[in-house]
Image (spheres, rainbow, N blue to C red):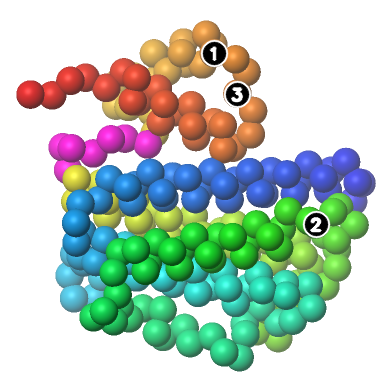
Amino acid sequence: MSDSLGTHYLADAVSSLHAYKKLADKAITQLKDGEIFQTLDEEGNSVAVIMKHLAGNMFSRWTDFLTTDGEKPNRNRDMEFVIEPETTQKHVVDYWEKGWRVVFEALEPLTAEDLMRKVSIRGEEHTVMQAINRQLMHYPNHIGQIIFLAKHFRSTEWNTLSIPRNKPVDFNKYLQEQKPVTGTEHRFDAASTFAEETKEPTG
């Protein structure tokens, strides 16, 4: 792989992860008191559980990423799906933020030369690129769940994070009038910013 292609891949991977985190954060901030712990049924996960699971995965996968197996012996995956009674929303959000910090601290120093290095996850060999792609598939899956739950709880009060219904033509025109938008993170921002600016007043 050429250095330029590898550098582009890493920049896009990091940008994509920042973009998905931002989407999740924008959904989470719309939740009202207690909704972060609410489930739709007995088998469903709350937003808090999903956040805790993702952060637990992040600590395990990205701590000493290049030198140790991505499934750490001290990880208790089952407990990631348990919210203890004393847990507060602040506890969950702080843990979430720490998990993401570990992700970016591991990824941002990487260079194109690192992409073909070998790492392991549960004893299975991966290239660094494969390990990154594995999480690029995993994290958005759960972030979609967070957005779904937040939208469900907010219902008609939901502030959309994507192109508003019946406004794709207006959005395309909006993009043409803005400065060029590059990178996944900026593309996601453009959609949510447009939605906010064109939101019709209620009441």
In three-dimensional space, the C-alpha distance between marks 1 and 3, rounded to whole angstroms, equals 8 Å
Queried whether the magenta region covers residue 158, the answer comes back as: yes
**Boundaries of the magenta span:** 155-161
Mark 1, residue position = 178
Within 10 Å of disc 2 (Cα), the crowding (few <14, some 14-19, many 20+) is some
**Direction from residue 14 to residue 118 in the image, left or right:** right
- Which residue in the structure is indicated by mark 2? 110
> Which quadrant holds the C terminus?
top left
Question: Which amino acid type is marked by label 2?
Answer: Leu
Viewer-nearest of discs 3 and 2: 2
| Residue 46 appears anywhere in the view | no
Q: Amino acid at mark 3?
A: Val
Instruction: Tell me the element at label 3.
Output: loop
The residue beneath circle 3 is 181
Return the residue found at the far left. 203
Identify the residue shown where x is 85% and y is 68%: 117
Q: Quadrant of residue 61?
A: bottom right
CB within 8 Å, label 1 to label 3: yes
